[in-house]
Image (spheres, rainbow, N blue to C red):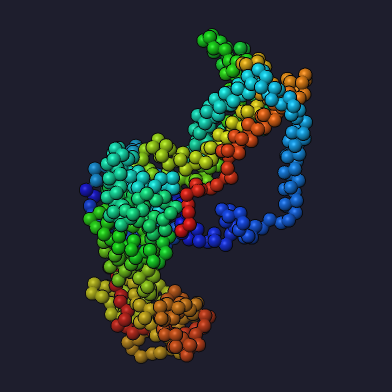
Amino acid sequence: MTFSLDATLHARNFDVGLTLGPAETVAVLGPNGAGKSTLLGIIAGLLRPDSGHAVLGQKTLFMLDDGNRHFLPPHARGTALLAQEPLLFPHMTVLENVAFGPRAAGANRASALQTARHWLAEVEAAEFADRRPGQLSGGQAQRVAIARALATDPELLLLDEPMAALDIHAAPMLRRLLKRVLANRRAIIITHDVLDALMLADRAIVIEGGRITEEGPTRAVLEKPRSKFAAGLAGMNLLPGTITGHGLTSDGGLDITAHPEDGAVPGQDGVAVFSPTAVSVFLSAEHGSPRNSFAVTITDLEPHGDQIRIHADGLSADITPAASADLELTSGMTVYFVIKATAIAVYPA
Amino acid sequence: MTPVSARRSKAWTVRKVNRRDTGYTGVPPWVFALAAAGALFVLLPLAAMVAKVNWGQFIPLITSEASLTALGLSLRTSATSTVLCIVLGVPLALVLARASFPGQRLLRAFVLLPLVLPPVVGGIALLYTFGRQGLLGRSLELAGIQIAFSTTAVVLAQTFVALPFLVVSLEGALRTAGTKYEAVAATLGARPTTVLRRVSIPLVLPGLASGAVLSFARCLGEFGATLTFAGSLQGVTRTLPLEIYLQRETDADAAVALSLVLVAVAVAVVGLSYRRPRAQPAEAGPA
């Protein structure tokens, strides 16, 4: 009972292969326009790939290669899709919305309504049963949308940034709710939020430019990012390059001193990863081993928690507002980012 | 169903719900002057007509047998034509709004043609299709069906001229509604027919209603195509506009009285069912 997908869609420069276990939740991360929604559209049957095949349990969702033109329509797939907007049918009550799936599957009215009540209670929205969608807040509507999707008993639940349109007060409750209902369920969730990925997903994949660039257990992807995107998401600096005996030479030509991890062989492609909090900022070059000192030009400064985050040449550093004021930092200035060798992790990419 | 953020951002624009709201409208004063001129242009002829009504004879004039027969025929045929417009127009609008196929733009142009075609030309075209010597008429004649100069011809003429109103109005509503709800319904397991019946049509019901009302009004006023294709037989094809035209030659008072009846029926129908166009159903309440 696994799900496997292999699909290409040339018009969107999309080529992704993916498999999911029976009760696995996968988080899909990636920049805007990378092909995340295309992935869900293809799985749900709303987009037709040029070639490839997908199997969900016993069902072949599509099989498009030489000679085969099998393409299952969306309603026969058992892949409920939950979007950013709740998209509750405005002309039905909340209860009728949730009963829509069971009704469409052929259940009689009474049992469909019973199923709907069960799922409304499950998302703590039973008291909204007789309301119209227009009378709900964004968070309430999204909870009802989750109930509506679950009421179809989907074999694979597809969630496209389900919390992106909610205000910050509604998101935590919905996240807890999703954690509860996604347990023991197969789901793919697109998110921009590290917290969602960590809390809800067993595994994370990063899609960039229509290809999977990184894949692994969520924690590993965030702790040891290999792509610029995952590093940025985890709030880490990442420099790809070639592993050397004492560290790594970045593609930009920086010679980095660090302690390469076991298994890192000199000459191999690797990445150097370090946290912005490990970076000190100086106005002049600081030497003295085992430290790294890079001259960089500040592009901008922004508040980050109670720190100031300095962006410079694709790297970032967090320093205190007082230090920033003392150094009179402004964008365009050339400064030195100094990082202890022990604060940099180097591992094969 | 508007997302919360969209609802909030609208707080400072004019809420059409409350007419007393003094929000910024952005309409320059001279536009109001021209709009007033436009309204007068429509209202003045109506007022002039009302002024000519012979009120003393009004009731006898409009309750004469010929008048009542014509009015009854007009209402019956217009209602039938509107049903026919819905049966043929809903699929056309769906195909034009949702599907994409070669020749789609051409199809839309041809469906909309009766809007700009002189009705008398439409009548001639129908005559050469369903008339005794027409394209289909000959085969129909062999089957014992004669359409031209019958009540059926009246219905066909009215449907021909009124169909574009329903298609245009419904296609617009379908495009505004978008396909998002339909896609969600499909992923919830609904077959295309179920999606159409339970989601697409209910969502565009206001558009469908206004399209049907416009079609009905157009049917009620239809003259040229009816006269050409169906003739003017009392009780069979002589609808109210034809009766008015006929009476105008002999009894101007009767023509004016019947005109007023036609205006009253049209205003009643349009006023009762044709409301201000709305993008979304009225349910979206405050957050």
Residue positioned 61% across, 28% down in the render: B219
Coordinates of residue B18 in the picture (x, y in percent): 58, 55
Is the C terminus of chain A in the top left, top right, bottom left or bottom right quadrant? Answer: bottom left
Q: Residue A309's image quarter?
A: bottom left
Nearest to the observer: residue B190 or residue A65: B190
Q: Position of residue B284 (x, y in %)?
A: 48, 52
Count of numbered labels shown in the rendering: 0
Q: Taking the image as drawn, is residue B199 in sight?
A: yes
Query: For residue A99, what is the image quadrant?
Result: top left
Return the residue nearer the eye: B67 or A210.
B67
* Residue A229 seen from this side: no
Q: Is residue B231 above or below residue A63?
A: above
Q: Position of residue A120 (x, y in %)?
A: 31, 52
The one nearer the camera, B17 or B228, is: B17
Left or right of residue A87, residue B214 in this image: right
Q: Quadrant of residue A276?
A: bottom left
Q: Which residue is rendered at x = 42% and y = 77% of the image?
A: A304
Foreground pick, A147 / B272 = B272
Does A46 appear above or below A224?
above
Q: Position of residue B129 (x, y in %)?
A: 60, 18
Residue sitting at x 74%, y 47%? B36
- Residue ID at (32%, 79%): A344
Residue at the front extreme? B56
